[in-house]
Image (cartoon, grey):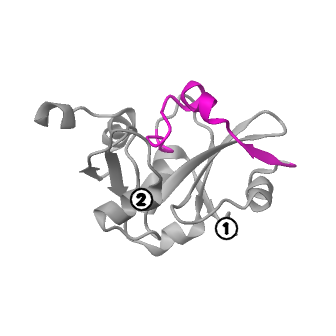
Amino acid sequence: MAKEKDVKTNAMRILDKLKIQYKVNYYECEEFVDGVHIADMLGQSYDSSFKTLVTVGKSKQYYVFALPVDKELDMKKAARTVGEKSLEMLPVKDINAVTGYIRGGCTPIGMKKLYRTVIHSTAQDFERIIVSGGKLGTQLELAPQDLAKACSAVFDDIIF
């Protein structure tokens, strides 16, 4: 079991290459459960625990949004932020093909391509935030500015 935990995800390798400090949190997880459930299970704040959502714009471009696990993406605000007329959620069946990650293990860092990424502005209120580590049962805890650096993200208000 210990050997499995030593396996680095693509996101971790990127953070290492950029010399960004992060902490890895491991937890037991056989299949996808939502971020609220994981935060409850691990005693983490919803406000500093971020989920990753992938959308597709009218232009057929993909966009990545990181927001608190208990909040909903405001599609109009999000579309305005990335300069699209409208956005739709990426169908679950397409997540792996587009990002290289599976549902529940999707992180803004190290997707197949560097997609335009927006982190909800409240992330800046925290010294450290938590995002998925790139596979089920793995989280990364890091400074919001470091997350933004690792995925070339901007901060904006993207929730209701």
Query: Does dot 2 land on a helix, a strand or a loop?
Result: helix
Residue 16, percent from left and from top = 30, 40
Q: CA distance from mark 2 to mark 1?
A: 24 Å
Q: Write down the residue under mark 1.
A: 157
Q: Quadrant of residue 5?
A: top left
| Residue drawn at x 50%, y 28% as measured from the top left | 100
* Residue 145 in sight from this viewpoint: no
Q: Write down the residue under mark 2.
A: 37
What amino acid does circle 2 point to? Answer: His
| Residue drawn at x 48%, y 41% as measured from the top left | 106
Horizontal side, residue 95 vs residue 73: left or right: left
Task: Specify which label sits upstream in the sequence, 2 or 1.
Answer: 2
| Residue 33 covered by magenta stretch | no
Q: Locate the C terminus by quadrant.
A: bottom right
Residue 98, percent from left and from top = 60, 29
| Residue 90 covered by magenta stretch | yes
The image's mark for residue 128 is none
Count of all numbered marks drawn on residues in the image: 2
Q: Which residue is the extreme one toward the left?
A: 2
Q: Is residue 121 above or below residue 133?
A: below
Q: Is residue 47 above or below residue 96?
A: below
Given residues 44 and 6, the one toward you in this image is 44
* Residue 154 in sight from this viewpoint: yes
Horizontal side, residue 98 vs residue 25: left or right: right
